[in-house]
Amino acid sequence: MSEEKKQPETASGPAALAAGLPVTTEPAVSTVKAPAETATGEAVQVRDSSAGGTSYGPEPTDVGPPALPAATDISVPDDRELEAWNEQVRRRMRQKSRRSFLGWGAGLVAGTAAFRWLTTRRAVDGVPWPLRKTLEVNEQLARDYFSTRRPSPSFNPDQVGADRVNGDIGLDEDVDVATWKLEVQGLGSQDEPLMLGLDAIEKLPRTRMTTEFKCIEGWSVVVDWAGARFTDFMKAYPPEMRSGDGFSLDHPEDLPPYVSMATPDGGYYVGLDMESMLHPQTLLCYERNGARLSEEHGAPLRLVIPVKYGVKNIKRIGSIRYSTLRPADYWAERGYDWYVGL
Amino acid sequence: MRSKHPLAIRWCHWVNFPLLALMIWSGLWIYWANDVYRLGIGGFTLFRFFPEGFYRTFGVGHQLARGMAWHFFFMWFFAINGTAYVAYTILSGEWRYLVPNRHSFREAVLVTLHDLGLATLTPPPDPPSPTGRGVRGEGGKLNGAQQIAYTGVILMGFGSLATGLAIYKPTQFAWLASLLGGYMAARFEHFLLALGYVLFFLIHIAQVIRAGWNNFRGMVSGYELVSSEEGAHE
């Protein structure tokens, strides 16, 4: 990476001259090679080698020593003249350096101030608001790009990974699958909540898939899931459309834009955007790796949504609500991105 | 006194330094939440990334949410600055000094051997090249080892953007993730690149110290002092 750099030596004085080494005067902006023959007696040159053609160098008129011989004069300067000339170059360099270091120093101060400002802003759900705003802008860009036609990669069922359990918030009490009910709100057909048993979900078309479950912590595991597509659930229990028209999946923009889900005790809750809920791999699951969901994995019914991190894959769903307002989200209130779309 | 580095290049260089540091720092906060990488064979672990003492010393632990918020903020500036740098080098022609040419690899080996004290020979100066392409004598900017290192680190930057995007949106950019060997592989590659920057930084700093004040000042002010002998060859 380094070669032995020439020391900030300016002129090599008589030695160079004795060796017949020429020195040139050329315009500071020139990138033309100086022919070696055009010796003029100048010991140090200023030139700009930036190929962009922009000159940051001093004007050529700044450069010459006061009593420089004419370009046609090939007389050799003596040591005293050379030293005067070199001193002038060194002075210019010091001046340039001083300005540059001051400039970058000011930049450093400004950058540090900007950083301090950024990190000391009022927090919105645990994140300084400029960073929270950026997460929201990132979300908008991701939602623009999002397509339900892009699936999360599928695996063979024999590729499932080792069992891994993470997260038990909202699962403190024991669940009785026999008496468990799912509460559905925001329906088009009725104002009051609808209570469903597990059999209602099992009656819907069964969908099986083997996908990679990705935890926000950075690990992932391949799991084989079975359950009902959320779109099939919506067809059976349609939400109230924003326009008040009859339910149709052909006009997704007319659907309520959000879905909220919570555990029966309300201890854990997630907010979801409707586009992600319409993804064909978004399932209400009751089976995992060929068996009924165990309690620690969210029996009797959990959400599996591969276009989101694990935190949105809520276990033991107690309620589902179609929502026109952006729902609260347990981890988003604790400093995480609300969207966490993959 | 000769102009060495254009303002745009110096600007991108010095802006990138704190940006990359912040990306690595916030990346560490994220990595901590699943710190599975290690150096070792089978059950034997030579070095774990990272030891508890490291986390404790630098206060890395329990900051996943904060790390993600920072990472997904500064990523834009890192990407924009890097793209601006590459665009400038292409448009200005500065790339000629940076991209390795057919002499670079031979010269890089000589430079490396020399710097390690394994060769008594100093690398020979490049012959004058009619194209002036990246030849050290032409503008005297970079030797072969530098060309390879500085071009390599730019490619690493784009590698970080690609692997980063593959981890960030592994479903919407599933093609990219699978191109990189899958989601888990992309995460590992992203981590390796971060380690690579640290390695680059250490060597870079050592070499800057070796090269001395005139060289360092060149990256700050844009100018360096050369002897008339050297200058006259141009």
Image (spheres, rainbow, N blue to C red):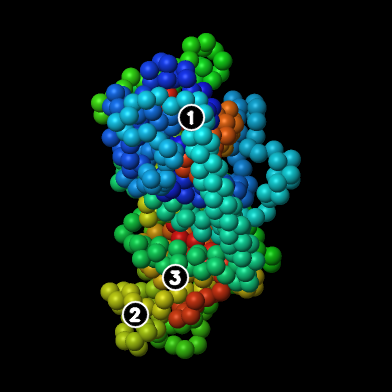
Q: What label does residue A273 carry, if any?
A: 3
Q: Which residue is drawn at 36% across and 41% down?
A: A28
What kind of residue is marked 1? Leu
Q: Which of marks 1 and 3 is in front?
A: 1
Q: Position of residue A137 (x, y in %)?
A: 45, 67
Same subunit under labels 1 and 3? yes
Check disc 1 and report its element: helix, strand or loop.
Answer: helix
Q: How crowded is mark 2: few (under 14 residues within 10 Å), some or many (20 or more)?
A: some
Q: Earlier in the sequence, mark 2 or mark 3?
A: 2
At a point 52% along the width and 29% down the height, the residue shown is A80
Same chain, labels 2 and 3? yes
Q: On what subunit does the disc labeled 2 rest?
A: A
Residue A82 - label? 1
Residue B160 point in image, percent of width and height: 45, 44
| Pointers 2 and 1 within a single chain | yes
Out of B227 and B187, give the one closest to the viewer.
B227
Q: Element type at marker 2?
A: helix
- Whole-percent x, y for residue A304 in the image: 48, 60
| In the displayed structure image, the side of residue A31 where residue A109 appears, left or right | right
Residue in view at x 47 percent, y 45 percent:
B10
Q: Residue furthest top?
A: B120
Q: Which of pointers 2 and 1 lies earlier in the amino acid sequence?
A: 1
Chain letter of the residue carrying label 1: A
Task: Give the residue type that dot 2 points to.
Answer: Asp
| A15 relative position to B49: left or right | left
Residue A135 placement (x, y as % from top left):
50, 64
User: Visible in this render: residue B169?
Assistant: yes
Q: Which mark is residue A254?
A: 2
Q: Are marks 2 and 1 in contact (CB under 8 Å)?
A: no
State the CA–CA distance, disc 2 to disc 3.
Answer: 13 Å
Q: SS class of the residue under badge 3?
A: strand
